[in-house]
Image (tube, coloured by chain):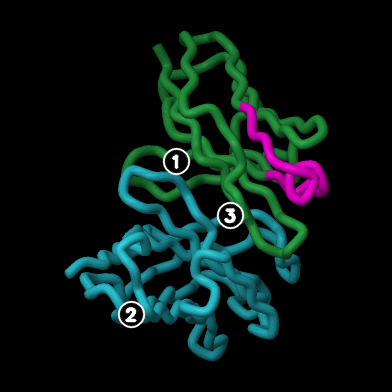
Chain colours: A green, B cyan
Amino acid sequence: QSALTQPASVSGSPGQPITISCTGTSSDVGGYNYVSWYQQHPGKAPKLMIYDVSNRPSGVSNRFSGSKSGNTASLTISGLQAEDEADYYCSSYTSTSTLVFGGGTKLTVL
Amino acid sequence: EVQLLESGGGLVQPGGSLRLSCAASGFTFNNYAMSWVRQAPGKGLEWVSGISGSGSTTNYADSVKGRFTISRDNSKSTLYLQMNSLRADDTAIYYCAKVSVAGVYRSPFDYWGQGTLVTVSS
């Protein structure tokens, strides 16, 4: 149950797009379309932003989108806004019926 | 309105035990799988354990298997985590989380509690 691999940090200017990658194996990300992305602001509980690779829950901005290719999933935020500055975590269902998270990515809006 | 309220955290010595509770309201509790997710200070999220709506299916992360036990009392709409043989690296905020789709164990978490802090230290 090794954690999924995410970049420790990414940054971008307001209005620019950014992409966060999440790399796993064929036993998790590559084997199932059950990848989710969570946003966490300091001192707050995580918030679901993307589920089942590319679906947005009601109320989440359409600036957030998800995709997957092989063992790597990606979260893209288009048109960065100041309030997007937060930590982002990917997660995936696994072949052992468990869940695994990525190490997290700190997004800085410059 | 869905609410999840954790309790039971605190300071415990290495090797000790603690039981966390998560009181749920605002939804039909026994229809939804639940999980515990923890976050060590300044670190990332770690899934700890999950349980199906009926309680018949449970799963654990390797890091806690054999030491932690997840359970639920659907008559009380409450989720539990019994933690034994606690170690320093179990120190974390423990969140309970509800899956988004009734009856689907692997669906994502749409609601989280605010967490309860567990500190393992002598």
- Subunit ID for the residue under disc 2: B
Can you tell which quarter of the image residue A87 is in?
Answer: top left
- Look at the picture and state if A42 lies above or below A32: above
Residue B61, image x and y in percent?
57, 65
Q: Residue at x 71, y 54 (%)?
A: A93
Callout 2: helix, strand or loop? strand
The residue singled out by tag 1 in the image is A40
Check disc 3: other Cα within 10 Å, few if <14, some if 14-19, many if 20+: some
Q: CA distance from mark 1 to mark 3?
A: 13 Å
Left or right, A102 with reference to B89: right
* Residue range highlighted in magenta: A21-35
Residue at x 54% of width, y 83% of height: B72
Question: What quarter of the picture does the C terminus of chain B occupy?
Answer: bottom left
Tag 3 subunit = B
Q: Can I make out residue A20 in this image?
A: yes
**Marked residue chain, label 1:** A
A30 in magenta: yes
Q: Pointer 2: what residue?
A: B18
Q: Nearer the viewer, residue A67 or A69?
A: A69
Indicate which disc residue B110 carries: 3
The kind of residue on which mark 3 rests is Asp
In depth, the one of A80 and A28 nearer the eye is A28
Which circle, 1 or 3, is nearer the viewer?
1
